[in-house]
């Protein structure tokens, strides 16, 4: 417990393949991906991790079918709205990295609401990497 990292970053991957293996649609995988996110956030906070970064949506992901992008954006808004009270209860601050200007306005405004509300929380910072890319990071 004395040697825990202060920052853990996770690249979300395999939701689609996991669902396909079960004979289900990719969106089924994303729905279950959100369950994993919830468990990981809870576990990391319990362990005393100070920063948890989730690489959730890369710039390449914008090339996916519109239906999948829309579903992911909807899931993101729904999850943020639903989980904000839990973040407050658990003293967790939300932050984002990536080119968030490219997110749909509804997603951006919901994120901002949650970021502002949780700004003074101190137990752990949950960083969502959205529309992330190494090239974008370097050029900006
Ligand atoms: C990785 O699996 C998952 C994604 C690229 C999208 C993850 C985003 C969400 C589930 C939206 C909600 C996010 C949060 C943080 C609440 P994949 O689609 O790359 O699967 P594959 O590698 O099997 O194709």
Image (cartoon, grey):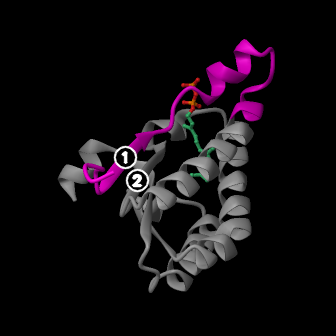
Residue 68: image location, x then y, percent:
69, 37
Q: Do the residues labelled 1 and 2 touch (CB within 8 Å)?
A: yes
Residue 6: give x, y in percent of width and height: 29, 57
* Residue 49 to residue 59: above or below: below
Left or right: 11, with 91 as reference point: left
Picture residue at 66% right of the left edge, 53% below the top: 73
**19 on left or right of 121:** right
Q: Give the range drawn in magenta.
A: 1-29
The reply, left or right, for residue 36 in relation to residue 22 is: left
Q: Residue at x 66, y 71 (%)?
A: 86
Does the magenta run of residues contain 11? yes
Residue indicated by mark 2: 53
Picture quarter with the C terminus: bottom left
The residue that mark 1 highlights is 9
Q: Is residue 78 above or below residue 21?
A: below
Residue at image x 65%, y 39%? 33
């Amino acid at each position: 417990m004395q040697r825990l990292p202060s920052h853990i970053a996770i690249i979300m991957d395999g939701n689609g393949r996991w669902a396909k293996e079960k004979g289900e649609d990719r969106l089924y995988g994303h729905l279950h991906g959100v369950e994993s996110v919830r468990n990981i956030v809870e576990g990391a906070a319990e362990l005393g991790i100070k920063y948890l970064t989730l690489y959730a949506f890369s710039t390449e992901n914008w090339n996916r079918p519109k239906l999948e992008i829309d579903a992911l954006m909807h899931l993101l808004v729904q999850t943020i709205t639903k989980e904000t009270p839990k973040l407050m209860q658990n003293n967790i601050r939300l932050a984002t990295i990536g080119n968030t200007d490219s997110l749909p306005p509804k997603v951006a405004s919901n994120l901002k609401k949650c970021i502002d509300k949780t700004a003074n929380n101190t137990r752990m910072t949950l960083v969502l990497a959205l529309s992330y890319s190494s090239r974008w990071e370097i050029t900006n």
